[in-house]
Amino acid sequence: MFDARKEYTHQAILDAYCHMLSENIQPNILDLAKRAKIGRRTFYAYYKDINAVHEELLRYLIIAYDLSDKDSRRNPMRMAISFLDYLHALPEKLQVVLKGNSSLYLELIDKVVISHQNPLVLSSLYHSALGIYRQWLIDGNTNYDLLKEAASDLISIGYRGYARKRPARKATNKASAPKAITLESLGETMGASAQAETSMP
């Protein structure tokens, strides 16, 4: 049976935790309880410790991500733009968290890219999308369509540049192992591509 009072307290705890994160304050039970206007005993009736609150928010982010656009899951570029849409659709209190502190979202990226066939590339694109969207929030902009268009251009510069630089497989009688992708090589490729794009007339 739904208990409105319990749900109110539950949401008050989550809201207090989100606001502390947004202010770059390391949450602790005593301060969180004060913000939520509850006692410590009440907090323990809902959560065993402060990490349990964090894990609940992270689980929510992962579930919301899993329910977001799945049609783009095979194409890293489309996935990065879809990730922007996912961030933009999150509830306001989680937008506030992202604006002040991105650590929760960095954990999310680590969790969701690990099963991708090329997690390094997808992680790089998601971090780019996250950084662009967070700066858009900080700057107080409101036109999401313009942001999405600009983000698509910025992210595609790096991804297409990387794709062009991938070593071509030579037709040989012996199978050769593909060149390992490293953070350094990916960064150099993205940087070189961005320079080439900006120098075009």
Image: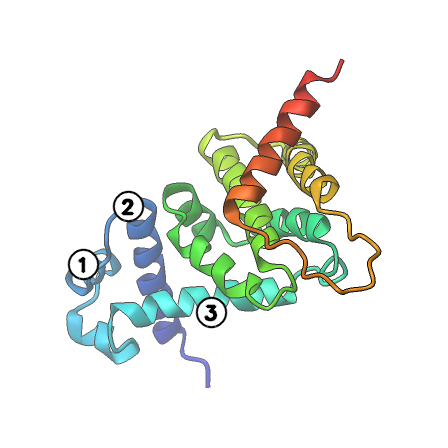
Question: Can you tell which of label 2 and label 1 is closer to the viewer?
Answer: 2
Which quadrant, please, contains the C terminus? top right
Query: In the current view of this chain or complex, which residue is farthest to the front?
Result: 173
- Give the residue at mark 1: 34
In the rendered image, which quarter is residue 43 located in? bottom left
What residue is drawn where x is 48% and y is 60%? 110
What residue is drawn where x is 17% and y is 69%? 39
Looking at the picture, how far across and down is residue 89, in whole percent?
59, 52
In the rendered image, which quarter is residue 163 located in? top right
- Give the residue at mark 2: 24
Q: Relative to 46, is 170 above or below?
A: above
Which residue is at the front of the view, 70 or 45? 70
Looking at the picture, how far across and down is residue 67, in whole percent?
64, 66
Circle nearer the N terminus (1, 3): 1
Q: Relative to 13, is 49 above or below?
A: below
Q: Is residue 61 left or right of residue 116?
A: left
Is residue 9 among the parts visible in the rendering? Answer: no
Rounded to the nearest angstrom, the CA distance separating label 1 from label 3 is 25 Å
Identity of the amino acid at label 3?
Answer: Arg
Residue 59: assigned label: 3
